[in-house]
Image: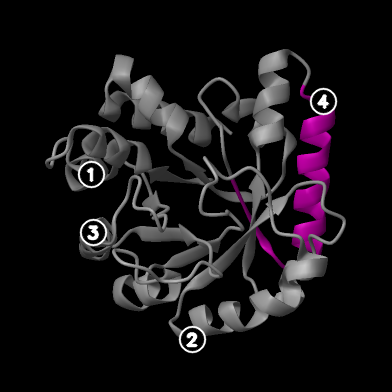
Amino acid sequence: MTALSVNVNKIAVLRNSRGGAAPDVVRAATTCLDAGAHGITVHPRPDARHIRAEDVLALAALCHARGVEFNLEGNPFAPAREGYPGFHALCAQARPAQATLVPDADAQLTSDHGFDFARDGGRLRPHVAALKALECRVSLFADAGDPDLAAAAAIGADRVELYTGPFAAAFAAGDATAALDACRQGAVRAAAAGLGVNAGHDLSQDNLAAFLAAVPGVLEVSIGHALVDEALYAGLDATVRGYLRLLAAA
């Protein structure tokens, strides 16, 4: 069964919009785990627009205590600054089970492209090695149609996370055939190179079943924005259980 890792960034966005401690990201993550989620994902950004360094440590402690995966996302090239010690420093403190590297610039609203492995491979290799020395599984954010996707294995990664934004947009527009084929081919290329396959970005209860039916061997999906949106109406516990039913059926 494909694992569900719930991204709780949007809970922190709500908290930060008002100040104070509500809603509580640890309480939200606990509710997701109580409902059966297999892990928790966060992507702390250098500007601390949502998840902060102290949240990372609190969520890591929760996941370690519960024996579930903690997936920490970030750009390894972003320099440390006040309030953000840098991605490697956070991983050294939090010891996530998985570190997912993304090429997001500081001002980027959300992840919207994968690494250019031909350009970035040499720079990524020592970062991947350092994270694996911390006993983190390393996943690299990748465009499904990238012809160099299999190069992630030579860089030292264990997995790639297929960027599913284009698929979700095509699905919403009514014709996801080409986007699904790109994801399927990307997953096949990754598996042939010995890489595990994760997926994430704009997956929802509307499109998840179609994605998993077409794309083989997806080990984990990381879902946040759509899940929190749906939870506003159905409740967090019920929404997580809805996703788990879709994963079980797939």
Whichever of labels 3 and 1 marks the residue nearer the N terminus, that label is: 1
Foreground residue, 241 or 138? 138
Q: Which residues are the magenta region?
A: 176-199
Q: In the image shown, does 118 or 109 lie closer to the viewer?
A: 109
Image location (x, y in percent) of residue 177: 82, 25
Q: Look at mark 4 in the image and give the residue it sits on.
A: 177
The location of residue 17, given as percent across then percent down, is: 25, 33
Figure quadrant of the C terminus: top right
Residue type, mark 2 in image = Ala
Q: Of the residues shown, which amino acid type is indicated by label 1?
A: Val
Mark 1 residue element: helix
Q: Which mark is residue 45?
A: none
Q: Given this view, does label 1 or label 4 mark the residue nearer the observer? A: 1
Q: Residues within 10 Å of mark 1 (few under 14, many from 20)?
A: many
Q: Vertical placement of 68 versus 250: above or below?
A: below
Q: Secondary structure at mark 4?
A: helix
How far separated are the C-alphas under marks 2 and 1? 29 Å
| Of labels 2 and 3, the one closer to you | 2
- In the picture, residue 23 is in which quadrant? top left
108 relative to 193, above or below? above
Percent across and percent down for residue 248 are: 49, 35
Circle 1 sits on which residue? 25
The residue under the point 24% across, 39% down is: 16
Q: Secondary structure at mark 3?
A: helix
* Residue at the (22%, 37%) spot, across then down: 15
Q: Earlier in the sequence, mark 4 or mark 3?
A: 3
Work out whether residue 92 can be spotted: yes
- Residue contact at pointers 2 and 4, CB within 8 angstroms: no
The mark closer to the camera, 3 or 1, is 1
Q: Amino acid at mark 3?
A: Arg
**Residue in the picture at 78% in, 17% down:** 175
